Image: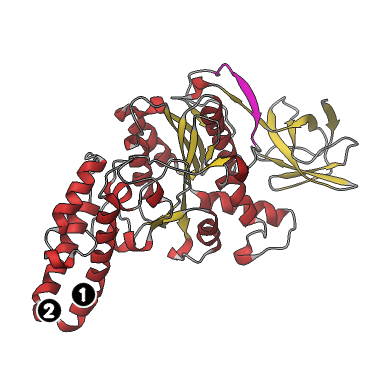
Amino acid sequence: MKIQYIGLEGINGPLVFLKTPKDVSFDEEVQIILPNNETRLGNVITVDEDITTIQVYEGTNGISTNSTKTMLKGKPLTVSLSEEMLGRIFDGTGKPIDGLGEIVPEVERSINGASINPISREYPRNYIETGISSIDGLLTLIRGQKLPIFSGSGINHNELANRIITGSNIKEDEKFAICFGLMGAEYETAEYFKKSFYETGSLSKVVMFQNLSNDPSIERILTPKVTLTCAEYLAFDLGYNVLVILTDMTAYAESLREISTLKGEIPSRKGYPGYLYSDFASIYERAGIVKGKEGSITEIPILTMPNDDISHPIPDLTGYITEGQIVLSRDLQGRGIQPPIDILNSLSRLMKDGIGEKYTRKDHSKIADQIFASYSKVQDIRALAKVLGESDLEDLDKKYLEFGNEFESQFLNQDVAKRRSINETLDLALEILNILPNEELTKL
């Protein structure tokens, strides 16, 4: 039932306050109607005996406390969904912005989808081939997994996200789609992604939702939820294997902090709300495989670590919820290695269950273990070389240094245009490992 009210009790940033109506519900969809008939989307975030608080997703500029109309929709926020969304670009609230017109909706769903019930979950198996050797060979992305990327300010994680989107596939006979949520991005960044999608022909498998830095920050609260609602429809209604990429979760968390402050909530670590963990979990736990359903949702949230601090609340809480992390290295980027993935600080906890003879190759696990063991030893020898000088190292240590340099320049460093299959990745790893004496290859 729709109810309309005239006038507001107050405005504070992206929040407006209404004298509490009789039948208002928490999380109810609200339409704000300005005197010029412009409409803005909002929802109820707090209800008490006297005042109801509404967050307005398109900002409160131009809203008057006297003549503004507030319409309560009697239902939660929803998004229109259809298979036609593939190949289309939408704003952070799910409205088309690519000039191709409205979609014809098949269903309308609440954006507040629930986390997948653990009882109905199917254990993640099989892998998604990204074409990036350091991920496919050493940090394998398993279908149904949530594997975040931890970046830093100035590190080009957008290029890595683009390479994953344009290079990922499962099998030719499977339905595969990517739902891409872009939050708080510069205009140039959004155009970079769009241009790449058009040029590589990958747009046909992508649904893109974008919230730019000059869009209302409050809209960023909606973007990941809308993106995941679309992914759930494609996966569990239409049987697609969906890869969800959300960047940048730091921008999302900043918006959450802004709203929490305006609501007068008691802050927790670094000023973020105490419910940041449960809020992240409500997003990350929507990934997975449901028993009896053909599709799956695999999630890659990307976040920027403030001051490269991995103990900051955003990466720290993300790490508790997800199944590993891919950490980008400022040092590797400074040496021109792209993508600059720090494999020794990275981990894919489900990797062992989605590789091997059935999925990738029989020797995959042994090759990965040997790479980690040998490259770890390289770091110790490099530290020793700084003290003694490289010329004073033993011959075996020099072999390890040679291996380390080749591994970084030939394996980790991968040309943007060069996509490697899993077999090419593993063959290259074996070739580089052959630099070391056979007696050192204890894992193979």
Q: State the count of labels.
A: 2
Percent position of residue 183, x then y: 51, 43
Question: Which region is colored magenta?
Answer: 102-111
Looking at the picture, tell me which residue is in the foreground, 65 or 442. Answer: 442
- Identify the residue at horizontal 67%, vertical 60% (top origin): 274
Question: The disc labelled 1 sits on which kind of residue?
Answer: Ile
Looking at the picture, tell me which residue is in the foreground, 133 or 180. Answer: 133
Percent position of residue 9, x then y: 84, 43
Mark 2 and mark 1 in contact (Cβ < 8 Å)? yes
- Residue bearing the label numbered 1: 381
Q: Secondary structure at mark 1?
A: helix
- Identify the residue at horizontal 45%, vertical 55% (top origin): 324
Q: Is residue 104 highlighted in magenta?
A: yes
- Residue bearing the label numbered 2: 393
Q: Secondary structure at mark 2?
A: loop
Left or right: residue 392 versus residue 266 is: left
Of all residues shown, which one is farthest toward the bottom?
388
Please identify the quadrant where the C terminus is shown: bottom left
Q: Earlier in the sequence, mark 1 or mark 2?
A: 1
Looking at the picture, tell me which residue is in the foreground, 17 or 174. Answer: 174
Question: The disc labelled 2 sits on which kind of residue?
Answer: Leu
